[in-house]
Image (cartoon, rainbow, N blue to C red):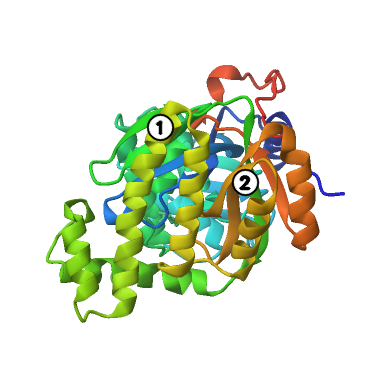
Amino acid sequence: MATAARIQPFDELLSDAIKNFEETFGKKPEVAACAPGRVNLIGEHIDYCDGFVLPMALPMVTIIVGRRNGTKDECNVKTLCPGADFPRKIQFTTDYLVRGLPRWANYVKGVIYNYGFPVTGFDAVIITNVPLGGGLSSSAALEVATMKFLELITNKKHEKESDKALICQKAEHTFAECPCGIMDQFISVMGKKNHALLIDCQSLTAEHIPFNASDLVVLICNSNVKHNLSESEYPTRRNQCTEALKLMGLSSYREVNSLHLEELEKSNADEVLKKRARHVIGEIERVKKATEALKKGNFEDFGRLMVESHKSLSSDFEVSCDELDKLVDIAMKCKGVLGSRMTGGGFGGCTVSLVKADEIDNVIKQIDAGYNGATFYVCKASDGARDIESEWTADMPLKFKSFYDIS
Ligand code: GAF
């Protein structure tokens, strides 16, 4: 029978990282940092269009434990993350940081390269319970955990949250060669327990919106498929959005009104560009409405907007796939599901659904019966990046009470 996936609890994860660090480097780690993955509730593919997005941080995190090793610039970093490419232990120097293999290390090196303060040599072990490659932002979790780790190692930090997110985004652009928007890094830095985060991707400001109805849960269904298209289509979508904007004679989607769209629709512009613009403009409005609904506790409206968002992503933005459409279709037929949509970049990965807590078991059962091979996570909005050091002494690593909300 299908149940929610067991995610390794935070205490266990931390304890494994500490133990492995001691075995590998012969000393206890001195600092520990963590940063979460995310699920986006609504506002998809519009963070790179000056839009609004509304993600929440997940209880699943990437943890980095380590210590300065007394060298000027020599770093030894090991990952215990399942699915990371080999080799899983590498050495590099902070004065010669280059992109290469293994891929997981690019995220770490990229953040060090863009950090803006000198970084001396350190040893570190990385561990995670964010599913890798599932569209839940394992990359941003690694970047932001690295940022937090560097703050502890260097005793220097950027004050503005948006600067931290921008540095991590730059790392991803330059070292991982993915032209991502700002959403994933922003929420991983700024997430807050029991809150979603409304991010204004134009002004790079954000507002925490309470999201803690006791009778509702967020269900994430991982389709466990990832179509190859995801990497090539992302930059294509970005370019199409820019082109459509130019055709409307504007420099930001925030300047668009219904007349601009009407004119574009009537013009002889490429139909594909019209569809892309339609999605972006509609999705920006949907996020505004969804935020209002959330503030009023109107989850029925919120759910309806999620479904509209999915339809637009599927038909106008064309980033969904059969598996995601199927998961949404089945979910929407289940009693107790208020809304469901694909989440993240698309072409596989996950759906997110808003579900009445007392129906969650039945919903999981029904989706599992109709879709072969999904993994389920039941989550509540959780905290963003944090320094575990202040709560931890190496002799007493397990004093955390698990703050897991995963059932
Ligand atoms: C990926 C990107 F990294 C984000 O910036 C965002 O564009 C998302 O896809 C789609 O909303 O996660």
Q: Position of residue 172 (x, y in %)?
A: 41, 56
Element class at badge 1: helix
Q: Which secondary structure, mark 2?
A: loop
Q: Amino acid at mark 2?
A: Val
Most foreground residue, 31 or 236: 236
Residue bearing the label numbered 1: 154
Identified at 75% across, 47% down, the residue is 364
Q: Is residue 215 above or below residue 126?
A: above
Q: Which sits in the foreground, 188 or 31?
A: 188
Q: Position of residue 209 (x, y in %)?
A: 42, 29
Compared to 341, does 118 lie above or below?
A: above
Q: Position of residue 147 (x, y in %)?
A: 43, 39
Q: Residue at x 40, y 68 (%)?
A: 316
Quadrant into which the C terminus falls: top right
User: Where is mark 2, residue-wise?
Assistant: 130
Which mark is on residue 357?
A: none
Q: Of circles 2 and 1, which is in front? A: 2
Residue type at mark 1: give it. Answer: Thr
Res. 305 visible in picture: yes
Q: Is residue 64 left or right of residue 197?
A: right
Neighbour tally class for label 2: few under 14, some 14-19, many 20 plus, Cα within 10 Å: many
